[in-house]
């Protein structure tokens, strides 16, 4: 983790050591709230000066969104914070994840509820090492083994979120193509699907399968992740090939929440979904054992 200055803005008390149980981004967000209030600005008023929404300011203050470096520089000028936000955000924004996913990964780590639709791949939080390695190798066929190892390690580190017995609540709708697309061969698929089954049987995740016969559905061109937080507005992350964006507009997020609810309504119930995943995993295992 990058070392941050995290000096108090009030000028009384000198340097402050951050609480190790609190993320650097949350601490920076708290300092942003303090600096804004000291200037007598509402979230909406500060947002207008930065050409962003008041809810975006609120999310940065709550630590659910990182403060981009260009905005950090503007904050220092508007709030008279002497370069505090630029210095600390430059350090805090370093990430082991690709730029298009880094902010979503950070939000995912503090979400209380995650709902994800995955039309083609097992979601990263639920992937096995072998499955993840095949996915990364297919995307970067000429990368060195060290690069692939680093990507796989970062993905497996994310899955440690599921080590907690109850948080976050993870609800996933898988397109049937996820089960049928043979990633890495039959042995890899059998292991990967059994891992999904094991998570579901431990009551750690809720899994549904959207069958081919369900026909057309909303997000047919990419995956979708909805994240809810204790004390900040919800976010939606939309991902394509090497791209991704976070949506925080309340009306837009509500639309994607409805889209997800419709996916869940069209999908098989959890028990039937689990039986299907288990059956396909056994088919892969049986075919792998055949001479």
Image (tube, helix red, strand yellow):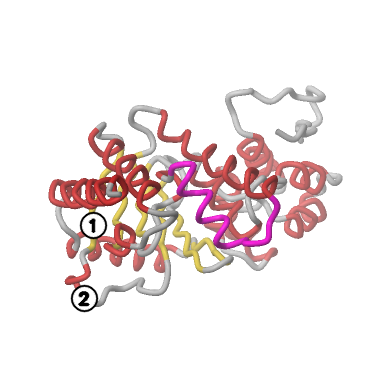
164 to 60, vertically: above or below: above
**Where residue 159 sits in the image (x, y, percent)?**
47, 38
Toward the bottom, the furthest residue is 216
**Where residue 234 sits in the image (x, y, percent)?**
43, 53
Label 2 CA crowd tier, 10 Å (few <14, some 14–19, many 20+): few
* Residue 48 left/right relative to 278: right
Residue depicted at 41% across the width and 74% down the height: 221
Does the stretch in magenta take in 150? no
**Where residue 100 sits in the image (x, y, percent)?**
61, 60
Dot 2 or dot 1, earlier in sequence = 1
Q: Magenta region: which residues?
A: 128-144
Q: Quadrant of residue 198?
A: top left
Residue where numbered disc 1 is placed = 209
Q: Nearer the viewer, residue 53 or 111?
A: 111
Q: Are marks 2 and 1 in contact (CB under 8 Å)?
A: no
* Residue 21 left/right relative to 145: left
* Residue 281 left/right relative to 229: left
**Where residue 74 sits in the image (x, y, percent)?**
78, 58
Residue depicted at 75% across the width and 35% down the height: 2
Mark 1 lies on a secondary structure that is: strand
Does the stretch in magenta take in 140? yes
Residue depicted at 58% across the width and 59% down the height: 44
Residue where numbered disc 2 is placed = 215
* Magenta span dominant secondary structure: helix
Disc 2 to disc 1, C-alpha distance: 13 Å
Toward the right, the furthest residue is 82
Instruction: Assign the N terminus to one quadrant of the image.
Output: top right
Question: Is there any visible trace of residue 31 in the rendered image?
Answer: yes
Q: Which mark is residue 113?
A: none
Residue depicted at 65% across the width and 44% down the height: 150
Question: Is there any visible trace of residue 10 in the rendered image?
Answer: no
């Amino acid at each position: 983790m990058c070392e941050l200055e995290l000096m108090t803005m009030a000028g009384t008390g000198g340097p402050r050591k951050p609480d190790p149980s609190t993320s650097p981004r949350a601490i920076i967000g708290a300092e942003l709230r303090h600096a804004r209030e000291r200037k007598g600005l509402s979230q909406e008023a500060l947002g207008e000066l930065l050409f962003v929404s008041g809810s975006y300011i609120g999310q940065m203050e709550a630590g659910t969104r990182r403060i981009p470096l260009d905005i950090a520089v503007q904050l220092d000028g508007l709030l008279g914070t002497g370069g505090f936000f630029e210095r600390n955000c430059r350090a805090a924004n370093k990430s082991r994840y690709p730029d298009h996913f880094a902010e979503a990964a950070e939000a995912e780590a503090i979400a209380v509820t995650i709902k994800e639709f995955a039309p083609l791949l097992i979601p990263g939080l639920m992937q096995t090492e072998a499955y993840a390695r095949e996915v990364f190798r297919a995307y970067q066929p000429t990368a060195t083994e060290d690069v692939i190892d680093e990507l796989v390690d970062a993905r497996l580190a994310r899955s440690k979120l599921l080590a907690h017995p109850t948080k976050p609540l993870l609800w996933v709708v898988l397109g049937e193509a996820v089960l049928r697309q043979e990633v890495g061969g039959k042995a890899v698929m059998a292991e990967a699907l059994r891992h999904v089954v094991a998570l579901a049987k431990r009551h750690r995740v809720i899994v549904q399968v959207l069958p081919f016969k369900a026909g057309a559905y909303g997000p047919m061109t990419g995956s979708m992740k909805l994240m809810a937080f204790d004390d900040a507005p919800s976010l939606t992350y939309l991902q394509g090939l090497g791209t991704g964006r976070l949506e925080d507009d309340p009306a837009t997020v509500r639309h994607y929440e409805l889209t997800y609810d419709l996916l869940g309504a069209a999908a098989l119930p959890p028990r039937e979904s689990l039986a299907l995943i288990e059956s396909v995993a056994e088919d892969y295992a049986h075919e792998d054992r055949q001479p």
